[in-house]
């Protein structure tokens, strides 16, 4: 493939030595190598009580970021640091004047919203761009993530590490132990890292950090402390293997069965392997055979009725999430890996050294050739996919890079290639710019087309002002088959979307902050015809544990004949809506997020023979997290959307109700039940039909770490249909009752072997 030629041209540049930054003039610390492994028992009475505890480096004097930036934390926090040749250790002593009010629940990994927590963030390459973050609750429940300066936290990243927690009569203690094999760092005898420690107290809406992490500056890692003292450590040429087995027995509806639709029984056994090899400490080769893409975590519900554009569901599959930030240099999602549906095997190579970064990915995808007639030219065809990414870190936090993606199917291909850069203008202003060109030749023949997408983003982040100005220009023939092109990036558009947020901090008030926000957008097609514009002022009031927001949005949207079949000419639709939102975390057992919107919206699902029109719209979004006891977590979601013509004729009502119950027996063992019901009642003013769907999901989990786990699950789904016998065979007909269209029992097991 042509991208291999590009790789050969780029490789010589990746061996040029570059010296990384080592100082920002801020605080610094030196940590010692430890004579033994520290435990919470070394800090009995929440004080360093043993020789190894007293050997560790101590930091304290945490500073608030919220609610009052720059003042001392309301509660005392101490952190003790050390390492050995295999592990980095951090012991947190989180003192609390009211320990009975500490929020701590026994929950599954990652589900720590609303609990007290502490956090260790390390930038192992000292480049102030990306970092590893490890967060732990008072009961030792983990959440890990990758921090990126231009995209915040990516919580899909998972690593194997250890944590413990203990609530005491003075507060709580947390132990974090991060194996050096779980993180990447330079091949150097003396390591220079950046480090930041954090603590969150939900009942006070307080975030505090050491060193100070002020809202007055844009960069998080630029405010981190330098950490030295780690010497002669390396994960070496270590390797890890994660074999997996997945087995299921299922009854599913076969719509193409002989004689007509019927339920079909089937069993399945899948065996696969993920392997990782670390080369020269900072370079990683990942291989996967028959990738483990069976899902045990379901996507959260989203409204898809009456939506013009594709809804984004995030990537959850393990092979794609590690170092995912390598392949997403800008907000333009040119590599959305859920487009790779059913691969047989894959290879990924990523790493950084001397200010350079490189990533490459190769795999195939069987999905395009499946479920096709034997006479179809694409029957049995597999897509071949390749991605190359390279970047160069410059002085400060600046970076330039390039990426090439290619998808080949039969005799056709789609190729996207371009350059991008991130530039820090000062402590508050940052800009990201890119230019990418696509070339596409259809698999079934036809003319080759090409186009360009240009993208410039300017952001200001400060305590009193946040601004986001984003200009995107996309040619008519730009195509990205491996990307996710939302309304701002779609072909044949050019425009700007932006928001400006002002924060005010009144003194001696029940308000912690409040302020107005203005969102605005303007978009045209490539001929200069306006196709979308909106203006949305809003105001938000922040109390201690409560937020309240009021907003109004005025929109003008143009539909052209290419947007809606049957429109004789372009037509402009003007509509206005208003909304309120309340978020409350005052109670330790309940978190509420309630939203209500009313006004007008565009009906793009009119009855057959009718054109789109402005309709009256009402939407309710409710999210309620309830923790009745320490081990039980109940997440409830209710979504209701109602649309009527302005003459009062019903278009549709859409309801989604989801309830997830998770009981945690231990840190490793849990039982989860999810029930989700969705119903659409169609009126005379739409081409939609009535639909109902009921799904049950039961899952028993034993999770040692993200890579070593056992799952036993059951899933059942029912829809509103009947199968009837006719003179020509079986047929599906709509029904008011629910009929099961699928169920499965599955077992999944994976285990990490490490060398």
Image (cartoon, rainbow, N blue to C red):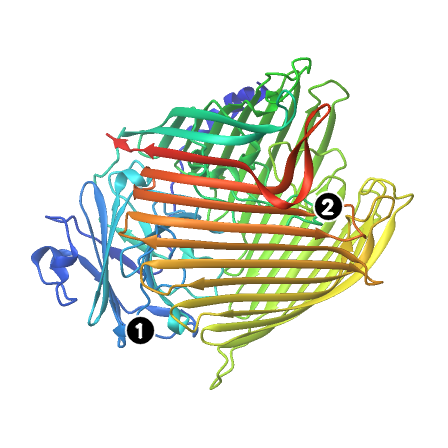
Percent across and percent down for residue 254 are 59, 27
Left/right of residue 392 with respect to residue 419 in the rendered view: left
The residue that mark 1 highlights is 101
Looking at the image, residue 510 lies above or below residue 312:
below
Percent across and percent down for residue 11 are 47, 25
Question: Around disc 1, counting alpha carbons within 10 Å, would you say few (fewer than 14), some (14 to 19), or many (20 or more)?
Answer: few
Left/right of residue 586 with respect to residue 488 in the rendered view: left
Residue 315 visible? The answer is: no
Q: Secondary structure at mark 2?
A: loop
Q: Secondary structure at mark 1?
A: helix
Residue at the spot 80% in from the left edge and 52% down from the top edge: 684
Residue 622 visible? The answer is: yes
Direction bottom: furthest residue:
508
How far separated are the C-alphas under marks 1 and 2? 51 Å
Tag of residue 11:
none
Front-lying residue, 297 or 77: 297
Residue at the spot 49% in from the left edge and 36% down from the top edge: 743
The residue that mark 2 highlights is 689
Front-lying residue, 573 or 58: 573
* Mark 1 or mark 2: whose residue is earlier in sequence: 1
Front-lying residue, 277 or 660: 660
Which quarter of the rendered picture does the C terminus lie within? top left
Residue at the spot 51% in from the left edge and 37% down from the top edge: 327
Image quadrant where residue 374 sits: top right
Looking at the image, residue 121 lies above or below residue 490:
below
Disc tally is 2
Image quadrant where residue 57 sits: bottom left
Direction left: furthest residue:
51
Looking at the image, residue 297 lies above or below residue 591:
above
Looking at the image, residue 177 lies above or below residue 548:
above
Q: Are marks 1 and 2 in contact (CB under 8 Å)?
A: no
């Amino acid at each position: 493939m042509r991208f291999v030629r590009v790789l050969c041209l780029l490789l010589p540049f990746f061996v040029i030595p570059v010296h990384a930054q080592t100082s920002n003039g801020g605080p610094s610390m030196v940590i010692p190598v430890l004579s033994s492994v520290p435990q919470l028992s070394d800090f009995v009475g929440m004080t360093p009580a043993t020789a190894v505890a007293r050997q560790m480096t101590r930091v304290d004097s945490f500073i608030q970021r919220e609610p009052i930036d720059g003042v001392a934390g309301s509660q005392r926090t101490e952190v003790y640091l050390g390492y050995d040749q295999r592990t980095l250790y951090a012991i947190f002593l989180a003192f609390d004047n009211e320990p009975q009010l500490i929020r701590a629940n026994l929950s599954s990994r990652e589900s720590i919203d609303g609990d007290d927590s502490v956090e260790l963030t390390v930038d192992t390459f000292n480049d102030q761009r990306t970092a590893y973050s490890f967060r732990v609750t008072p009961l030792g429940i983990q959440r890990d993530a990758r921090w990126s300066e231009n995209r915040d936290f990516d919580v899909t990243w998972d690593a194997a590490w250890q944590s413990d927690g203990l609530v005491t009569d003075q507060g709580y203690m947390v132990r974090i132990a991060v194996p050096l094999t779980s993180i990447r760092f330079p091949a150097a005898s003396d390591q220079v890292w950046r480090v930041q420690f954090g603590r969150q107290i939900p009942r006070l809406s307080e975030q505090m950090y050491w060193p100070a992490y002020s809202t007055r500056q844009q960069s998080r890692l630029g405010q981190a402390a330098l950490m030295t003292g780690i010497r002669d450590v390396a994960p070496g040429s270590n390797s890890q293997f994660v074999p997996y087995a997945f087995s299921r027995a299922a009854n599913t509806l076969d719509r193409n069965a002989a004689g007509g639709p019927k339920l079909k029984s089937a069993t399945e056994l899948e065996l696969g392997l993920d392997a990782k090899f670390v080369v020269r400490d900072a370079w990683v080769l990942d291989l996967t055979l028959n990738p483990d893409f069976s899902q045990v975590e379901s996507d959260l519900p989203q409204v898809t009725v009456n939506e013009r554009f594709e809804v984004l569901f995030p990537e959850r599959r393990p092979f794609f999430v590690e170092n995912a930030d390598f392949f997403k240099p800008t907000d333009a999602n040119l590599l959305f890996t859920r487009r790779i549906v059913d691969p047989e095997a894959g290879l990924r190579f990523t790493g950084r050294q001397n200010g350079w970064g490189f990533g490459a990915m190769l795999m195939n995808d069987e999905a395009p050739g499946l479920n096709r007639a034997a006479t179809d030219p694409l029957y049995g065809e597999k897509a071949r996919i390749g991605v190359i990414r390279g970047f160069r870190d410059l002085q400060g936090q600046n970076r330039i890079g390039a990426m090439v993606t290619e998808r080949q199917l039969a005799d056709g291909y789609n190729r996207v290639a371009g350059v991008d850069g991130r530039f820090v203008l000062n402590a508050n202003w940052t800009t990201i710019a890119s230019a990418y060109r696509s070339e596409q030749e259809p698999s079934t023949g036809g003319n080759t087309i090409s186009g360009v997408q240009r993208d410039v983003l300017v952001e200001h982040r400060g305590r009193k002002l946040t601004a986001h100005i984003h200009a995107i220009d996309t040619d008519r023939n730009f195509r990205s088959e491996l990307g996710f092109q939302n309304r701002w990036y779609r072909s044949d558009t050019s425009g700007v979307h932006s928001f400006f947020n002002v924060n005010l901090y009144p003194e001696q008030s029940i308000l912690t902050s409040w302020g107005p926000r203005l969102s605005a957008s303007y978009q045209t097609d490539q001929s200069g015809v306006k196709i979308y514009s909106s203006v949305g002022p809003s105001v938000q009031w922040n109390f201690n544990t409560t937020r309240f927001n009021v907003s109004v949005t005025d929109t003008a949207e143009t539909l052209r004949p290419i947007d809606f079949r049957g429109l004789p000419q372009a037509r402009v639709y003007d509509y206005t809506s208003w909304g309120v939102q309340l978020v409350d975390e005052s109670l330790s057992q309940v978190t509420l997020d309630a939203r209500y919107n009313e006004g007008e919206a565009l009906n793009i699902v009119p009855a057959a023979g009718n054109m789109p029109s402005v309709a009256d719209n009402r939407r309710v979004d409710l999210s309620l997290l309830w923790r009745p006891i320490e081990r039980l977590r109940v997440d409830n979601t209710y979504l209701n959307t109602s649309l009527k013509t302005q003459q009062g004729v019903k278009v549709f009502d859409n309801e989604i109700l989801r309830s997830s119950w998770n009981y945690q027996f231990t840190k490793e063992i849990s039982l989860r039940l999810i029930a989700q019901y969705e119903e659409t009642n169609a009126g005379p003013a739409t081409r939609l039909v009535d639909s109902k769907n009921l799904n049950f999901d039961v899952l028993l989990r034993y999770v040692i770490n993200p890579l070593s786990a056992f799952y036993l699950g059951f899933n059942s789904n029912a829809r509103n249909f009947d199968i009837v016998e006719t003179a020509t065979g079986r047929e599906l007909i709509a029904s008011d009752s629910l009929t099961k269209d699928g169920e499965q029992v599955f077992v999944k097991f994976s285990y990490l072997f490490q060398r």
